[in-house]
Image (cartoon, helix red, strand yellow):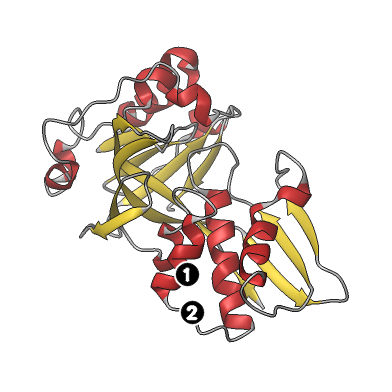
Amino acid sequence: MILFPNAKINLGLNIVEKRWDGFHNIETVFYPIKINDSLEIIEAADTEFFAHGIEIPGDNHDNICLKAYDLLKHDFNLPPIEIHLLKNIPVGAGLGGGSADGAFMIKLLNQKFGLGLTIEQMQVYARKLGSDCAFFIENKPVFAFGKGDEFTGQEINLEHHFLVLVKPAIHVSTADAYGGCAPSKPKTSLQMLLHLPITEWKGLVINDFETTVFPKYPAIARIKEELYENGALYASMSGSGSSVFGIFHEPVQLPNLENDHKVFYGV
């Protein structure tokens, strides 16, 4: 059985406060986009994980897909399986690719072995894997708060616009992104700002990580500038970076950006 974990972008991201447990409370809107990995499971004699495509940092034995399998195996009598992950979503890009893989693994096991888990039950498991994993269970636009694992519905639809995503050859660690950030509650709710026309988002819908990431990686800041120079209605870094997206009225081609970066069109 195969599923296709997808990426997400952040429409705005406010770092609200430091938590007692060392994490931060944030406010953001997660929006799913059409860049996908491929995740397959096959019953086998032993449980093994195989990665293909883009190289995934770290030890394969610690992959989030295996962690999701072990999490459910603790509560269900799962057979041994082979896990095959074809990695296409860029890593270290603020697109939630790893989180998506973990969440889709839960959904895949639920479907394959008829576990009967509800959306809410799968979200409980997903929250144990990472802060934004639970989003990918229902996989629809949401206003996310707390650690990024609590949600309320957000009515927003970008299907009538053209989305371009640019991934430079830069990996931004979460620690780098949070380093030097100054948490604060935004003056105007992000939920309210996103009800404005997209043409009014520039300068109002902010990703707080840009204040720490852009000075360290000016090449990422330059991508945002180039998207605006090429007619983007709105442009922003996604999550903690390094990818940057632009929302356009109509399809565009950006050959200057293609020279140095990976560009995804119409995602």
**Is residue 56 placed above or below 18 in the rendered structure?**
below
Task: Answer left or right for 118 relative to 70.
Answer: left
| Res 192 quadrant in image | top left
Q: Which mark is residue 60?
A: none
Task: Residue at 39%, 71% (x, y): give it.
Answer: 120
Residue nearest the observer in this picture, 260 or 129:
129
Q: Which residue is mark 2?
A: 117
Secondary structure beneath dot 1 equals helix
**Is residue 168 placed above or below 131 in the rendered structure?**
above
Which image quarter is the N terminus in? bottom right
Task: Residue at 57%, 81% (x, y): give it.
Answer: 111
Q: Residue 31's x, y, as percent? A: 35, 53
Q: Residue 81's x, y, as percent? A: 77, 72
- Judge whether residue 36 can be spotted in this image: no
Q: Residue 237's x, y, as percent? A: 39, 33
Amino acid type of the residue that numbered disc 1 sits on in the rendered structure: Met
Query: Which residue sits furthest right?
Result: 45
Q: Which residue is mark 1?
A: 122
